[in-house]
Image (cartoon, rainbow, N blue to C red):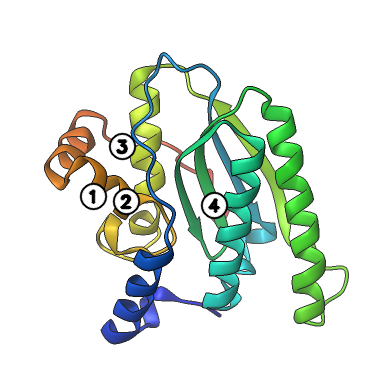
């Protein structure tokens, strides 16, 4: 099972270097006057680390996820992929189409992974949910929550050290001081409490 916490510093550095070379760039912070802003998330069934079985599977799925969102949304503003779930902040004028496209991706990858793991019939994804962003504060708290998710789950101690997210390019785009300012102004607090708790 893929586990960032068990990787040596050298292995982490190698992964980060590779991700920096191939990562998708941050397209600029969202402005709330843009309509149709959504927080989209999905989890593996029973929070099993199916996506995180290997680093290659993580990398491949991230590329497919971002490719799907690039086709079926107007813009991907932030994302984070963990071994058993993901979160994205997107602009979509047709959120049902976006969720449907993600469902098709889940189905395709479930078939592929179940073949690789020789577990036909396993349910890989539980569901995909979407929440419309309601305010400026909700937007920035959501962005902070997405980028902080690997810290919340104990994979890293700093946002920018998790390779499967837009956090590093976000910080590089606006600067660490501004990112820290937005973190203090729009704290996560209990945002999302219970959403991705494996015990629930």
In the image, 24 versus 193, the foreground residue is: 24
Report the disc number at residue 169: 2
Could you tell which of marks 2 and 3 lies nearer the N-terminus?
A: 2
Could you tell which of marks 4 and 2 lies nearer the N-terminus?
A: 4
**Mark in the foreground, 4 or 3:** 4
Q: Quadrant of residue 132?
A: top right
Rendered location of residue 131, percent (x, y): 57, 28
In the image, 145 versus 56, the foreground residue is: 56
Q: CA distance from mark 4 to mark 1?
A: 22 Å
Evaluate if marks 1 and 2 touch, with contact meaning CB atoms under 8 Å apart. Answer: yes
Q: Is residue 155 visible?
A: no
Q: Is label 2 in a helix, a strand or a loop?
A: helix
In the image, 193 versus 136, the foreground residue is: 136
Q: Which residue is mark 4?
A: 86
Q: CA distance from mark 4 to mark 3?
A: 19 Å
Point out the image quarter for the N terminus: bottom right
Q: Which residue is mark 3?
A: 189
Q: Residue at x 61, y 63 (%)?
A: 61
Name of the residue lying farthest toward the left: 177
Evaluate if marks 4 and 3 touch, with contact meaning CB atoms under 8 Å apart. Answer: no
**Crowding at mark 3 (Cα within 10 Å: few <14, some 14-19, many 20+):** few
């Amino acid at each position: 099972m893929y586990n960032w916490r068990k990787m040596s510093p050298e292995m982490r550095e190698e992964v980060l270097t590779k991700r920096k070379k191939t990562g998708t760039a941050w397209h600029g912070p969202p402005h709330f006057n843009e309509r149709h802003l959504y927080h989209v998330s999905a989890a593996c069934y029973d929070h099993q680390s199916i996506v995180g079985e290997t680093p290659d599977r993580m990398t491949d799925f991230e590329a497919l996820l971002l490719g799907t969102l690039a086709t079926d949304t107007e813009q991907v503003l932030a994302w984070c992929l963990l071994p058993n779930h993901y979160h994205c902040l997107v602009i979509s004028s047709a959120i049902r189409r976006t969720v449907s496209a993600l469902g098709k991706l889940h189905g395709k990858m479930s078939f592929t992974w179940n073949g690789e793991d020789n577990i036909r019939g396993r349910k890989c994804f539980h569901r995909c949910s979407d929440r419309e962003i309601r305010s400026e504060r909700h937007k920035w708290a959501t962005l902070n929550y997405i980028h902080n998710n690997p810290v919340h789950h104990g994979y890293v101690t700093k946002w920018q050290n998790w390779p499967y997210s837009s956090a590093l390019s976000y910080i590089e785009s606006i600067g660490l001081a501004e990112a820290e300012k937005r973190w203090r102004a729009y704290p996560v607090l209990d945002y999302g409490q219970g959403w991705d708790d494996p015990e629930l």
